[in-house]
Amino acid sequence: MANQQINSGNPRVDLEYRRKKNAEEMRYQVVSFTLMIFLTLVAFAAVAIEGFTAWFTVPFIILLAFVQVVFQLFYFMHMSHKGHEAPSLFLFSGLGFGLVMVLAFMTIVWW
Amino acid sequence: MSTYAQKKGFGSVIWDYLTTVDHKKIAILYLIAGGFFFLVGGIEAVFIRIQLAVPNNDFVSAGAFNEIITMHGTTMIFLAAMPLLFAFMNAVMPLQIGARDVAFPFVNALGFWLFFFGGVFLNLSWFLGGAPDAGWTSYASLAIHSKGHGIDFYVLGLQISGIGTLIGGINFLVTIINMRAPGMTYMRMPLFTWATFVSSALILFAFPPLTVGLTLMMFDRMFGSNFFITENGGNTIIWEHLFWIFGHPEVYILVLPAFGIFSDVFSTFSRKRLFGYSSMVFATVLIGFLGFMVWAHHMFTTGLGPVANAIFSVATMAIGVPTGIKIFNWLLTMWGGSVKFTTPMYWAFAFIPSFVIGGVTGVMLASAAADYQYHDSYFVVAHFHYVIVGGVVFAVFAATHFYWPKIFGTMLNEKLGKITFWLFFIGFHMTFFVQHFLGLWGMPRRVFTFLPGQGFEMSNLISSIGAAFMSAGVIVLLINVIVTSVKNEKVGNDPWGDGRTLEWSIPSPPPFYNFKQLPLVRGLDPYWLEKMEGKKGMTPAEPLGDIHMPNASFIPFVIAFGLFVAAFGALYNGEKSWAVPVIIIGLLITFGSMLVRSLKDDHGFHIHKEELMDDNDKGVKA
Ligand code: HEM
Ligand SMILES: [Cu+2]
């Protein structure tokens, strides 16, 4: 709601708290960023290395993509924080509707 | 506030509206533009009924007839019904939640101008070589082969106005999530606000499929691709899916706000809290959700197969359940209330049986096996007019009379309002009731004439006479508007005397900052609660302070205008040598003005506390 009180009134407390919070945030960001780069490399590797069949690589890459999406949403777009219920509701309903459509196109649209 | 009292020249009033970012003025713009397109679509409807009044008529040619029905449907849905509902959402919703403005005033203005230029572009087709003629659904198998530029106007015009609707919907969503006054929890929001919320969410999810469909169609028609062209391996059915994935939610985008308006009208004039408030909210959300799962009921006869038909058939019938919940709640709201029959209440009262008829035929159509009989016959025409006119248009009329004082500060004449009602109500049932039977007797829809001796003459004539009654009703409404504006008798905060929600606690029309102090909301129907405790107005939730307001801006108009220009280039691409330069110029205007908007800081302005106090002392409104 618009009128949430974010400031405690005491500027010092606020500042210290925020500084600590930010440092923590930053650590998460860096960690997840490294992980994401790492996962991307793994994905590339899975494709590049010969010997894996498509039956392994395709599901594997999709799995990695899924993990990436979760990282993206929860660490970079702060979805894990409080006050993001409405955006996540909309994101997931959008995802749901989109998937229903994909399902429909794959099953009932004849070619 | 002084700006209100000043007499302004005509030019400066125009400029004011061209640059406004105030949701109340944008509401008036939507009302004027939507009202204009409603008249245009209405004239087209009258032409259709004149042509079909007698067999073998040659009032218009077959080709012109196709253009008229296409433009009638497209105009009514996209350019009349939606903008008129947007008008009331803009005018009322921010007041109902106790907000000073919408979340994105600039985007709000941009949304209007995009809709407006899209609509103008679409209608210019009449003067530039012929209107679209493949029906408002514009099925690809027909549309791809349509000669001339009609379909191109449809594609580009709807694309532009669609962007406007989409950003308008996003703006409403953010406004409702973020800008509610202290104490205005979700479960205290008036039903019209709830309907706006769910309807905007549907816009958010339903318009992208339309955008995709229109883009593919644009490439097929203008740039030589083959998405829908079967000879080259495309698939024309994909358009139908994309269109109806949008199209069915669209009908709920229209009817949910109508439900919201009626809910508020019923409780106001039954002078009673809405019966079953939480089940109403639940039903609204559920209808919105189910609305996405049923689109293929428009395609039963395309050969989806029995399993798909069965699934979509059952899903469609399921929507009848939450709709039924609503009907009973409205009836029980009136039950035991002290009902006052004002003009808005007339419309609300007549809406129930009319809409129920449309719902019943809807469930009939939903049974796939039976639909093979009804499909593409006048039965379908009767069905959707019963729901759209009996639901949405009735609601627009109700809201026009109900909120007119809040928007313009004057009261529409009740006697004329009731005359409008009777003319329109009788005309409506005359026109559309017989069409059920015409359909069952075998008259197909979208035919430009019929032969004598098939038993269609009498009913078609009755139907056309009904259309004349409806037109007369609309004319009486226009007279009413003129008479009321000329008389210009100003009314106070709560002209109906029974206002329940926050919009009635402030002056009519409200000052441009709406609430001098944000109100404290203590329950459902907050203004009614305070009145019941003998208070005159709302308890403020904050001390008097400076108010931050956005600056007016001409940029939304220019952004939309650029797309309008570019659309002409795209339309004549490959045909005229100036096409490509025009596309480029148009896009430069649009993106250039977006750049200006991004680079130039505009912090808005403050209304100072002292000015607000001045108003109090002089006893000026607010
Ligand atoms: C109980 C709820 C409803 C049910 C079960 C229902 C069912 C149906 C079905 C099955 C059709 C397809 C008929 C055919 O083409 O053979 C249809 C068409 C249509 N319905 Fe409904 N409907 C309902 C409510 C609504 C509402 C609320 C609206 C609008 C506000 C609406 C607007 C339309 C329109 C515009 C069409 C015709 C589309 C076209 O082919 O041009 N319906 N309905
Ligand atoms: Cu439908």
Image (cartoon, coloured by chain):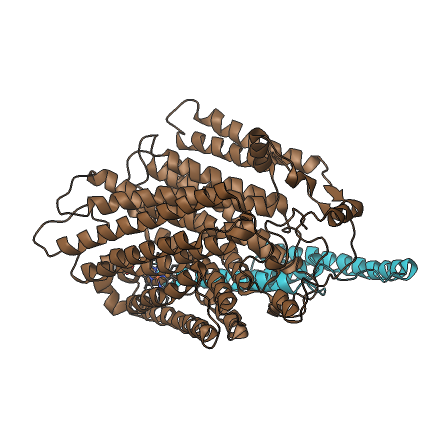
Chain colours: A cyan, B brown
Residue B614 visible in the snapshot: yes
Check the picture and name the quadrant holding the C terminus of chain A: bottom left
Image position, residue A100 (x, y; %): 46, 64
Relative to residue B603, is residue B190 drawn left or right? Answer: left
Please say if B591 is above or below A75. above
Image position, residue B430 (x, y; %): 25, 57
Image position, residue B240 (x, y; %): 35, 53
Give B189 or B311, whichever is nearer the viewer.
B189
The residue sitting at 63% across, 63% down in the picture is: A86
Can you tell me which quadrant of the image ligand 2 is in?
bottom left
Relative to residue B539, is residue B218 drawn left or right? Answer: left
Check the picture and name the quadrant holding the N terminus of chain A: bottom right
Image position, residue B25 (x, y; %): 57, 44
**Residue sitting at the far top:** B577
The quarter holding residue B178 reads bottom right
The quarter holding residue A69 reads bottom right
The residue sitting at 45% across, 51% down in the picture is: B413
Residue B167 visible in the snapshot: no
**Residue sitting at the far left:** B453
Relative to residue B54, is residue B152 drawn left or right? Answer: right
Give B281 or B527, whichever is nearer the viewer.
B527
**Residue sitting at the far right:** A12
What is the total number of numbered labels drawn onto the structure image? 0
Give B83 or B250, whichever is nearer the viewer.
B83
Give B77 or A81, whichever is nearer the viewer.
B77
